[in-house]
Image (cartoon, helix red, strand yellow):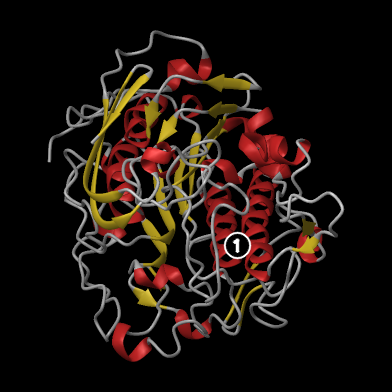
Amino acid sequence: MLALVVPTVRAADRPNIILILTDDLGWGDLGVYFQNARRASGNTASFTTPHLDRLAREGAQLTHHYCAAPVCAPSRASLLLGVSQGHANVRDNQFDKALENNHTLATVLRRAGYATAAIGKWGLHGQSNTSTDGAQPDAPAHPLNRGFDSFYGMLRHIDGHEHYPKEAPYFAEKAKARGPVSVWDGRSNVTAGLDKCYTTDLFTARAKKFITAHTASTPQQPFFLYLAFDTPHAVLELPTQAYPAGGGLKGGLQWLGAPGRMINTASGTIDSWIHPDFAAATYDDSQDSVAPPKPWPDVYRRQATSVRRIDDAVADLRQLLVDLHADEDTLIVFTSGNGPERESMLGGQFSPEFFASFGPFDGIKRDLWEGGLRVPTIACWPGHIPAGRVVAQPSAQWDWLPTFAEVAGLPAPARTDGVSLLPALTGQGRASERGPLYFEYNVGGRTPGYPAFEPGRRDRPRNQMQAVRLGDLIGVR
């Protein structure tokens, strides 16, 4: 590993950094990106994300921002390493492969004096995805071995498919072959105490606990929090109850820390609560103005509820920063690991067509078309990023390593394919020269034949794919 020369930077000049990564959230799944316009056109198969819309209004939208690969493990590897798939060691469908021992977002920021924490889904630890014993604490690429001071979450990729780790209703029949779903606090398996803990709630409450405890104990030390939700991916399970009122220190989700009552929503019935905005939602699927509207199918009420839960969690975290007088000292980046999925894993028909989760683009998860790669991305840093800013220059998630390095007062490692986005976000400073963005992915199957897609891309075999974007041109092989 190459050494970094750390300049003298005052703590006040280094903001906290919170990187929020969602799983399978499409470019079209946010109100401010696509859903609001869809509803304004009269399409009632749409939903709102009011708190994320507010985050965008008070910060910047990166409307041409790309993930590194159209599926989660390689995409996350490139994000953490700061390199494209052309240089990352985790590619294609290499789930749970060990993230190489090199610079990561966490190692760079730790050298700059940051406390570093990873909460949520990892999937890059270096142990078998199908072991009947599940994950193990001695994983070679455990987050604690890749620059993070603390970790709370799921090591295995497969465990992130299940959103109730202890009860694991979806995994009940699969546990013998795949091993138990596990949540880890550092190297300790803590799943036994997680009764009725919906993962979006669990990870949000744990993130609030980390921020509150760190601010109280070492207020002069900035922190980096990598909060990787495992929703709305895969099993579209529902929360147990409504999001608790308020937010921040006194309201919203709270960490209780008692086995069987770990968080304040660990009650009620698992997989039961539909957001009231969607409980009686209807749509017209006949194109006949006389025909009565139909209720949304259950799977889409679940999807919308899952996204709104993330929306509420972001508002809760922002209120916490306000309560701690840390909101102006914190850079928040919100994004997604890849484009939208076409399977709910709960059975029954599910398609990203219902909400047009791919937005105005062709392709979904596992495609190198825009719908699989372009992801909704927002950055907010009060007093530094002008409110309402729209960044239309092409950028990619491997740009966050040099961006965070510049924010922290460090030079970026020589081994990065990214450029700092700070000048584009703030409107100050000179932007680095942008080279081409490179993508690759190899998988079987075909791009769906959705009527909304261009005819030449419908039902097209995937196989080995590459894409390059240079300026306003993109070429796909």
Instruction: Residue 149: give x, y in percent of width and height.
Output: 35, 54
Instruction: Residue 290: give x, y in percent of width and height.
Output: 87, 53
- Name the residue tied to disc 1: 205
Look at 67% across and 64% down and name the residue there. Answer: 254
- In terms of secondary structure, where does tag 1 sit? helix
Residue 384 at least partly seen? no
Residue 143 sits in which quadrant?
bottom left
Residue sticking out furthest to the left: 1
Look at 73% across and 63% down and name the residue there. Answer: 296
Q: Nearer the viewer, residue 153 or 161?
A: 161
Instruction: Residue 243: give x, y in percent of width and height.
Output: 74, 63
Residue 365 at least partly seen? yes
Q: Nearer the viewer, residue 191 or 89?
A: 89
Q: Which quadrant would the N terminus be assigned to in this image?
A: top left
Judge from the rendering whether residue 151 lies leftward or rightward of residue 306; answer left or right.
left
Look at 78% across and 63% down and name the residue there. Answer: 294
Q: Nearer the viewer, residue 295 or 132?
A: 295
Rendered position, 86 above or below 429? below
Q: Nearer the viewer, residue 429 or 150?
A: 429
Judge from the rendering whether residue 338 lies leftward or rightward of residue 427; answer left or right.
left
Residue 286 sits in which quadrant?
bottom right
Rendered position, 33 above or below 445? above
Instruction: Residue 419: give x, y in percent of width and height.
Output: 31, 23
Look at 82% across and 64% down and name the residue there. Answer: 280
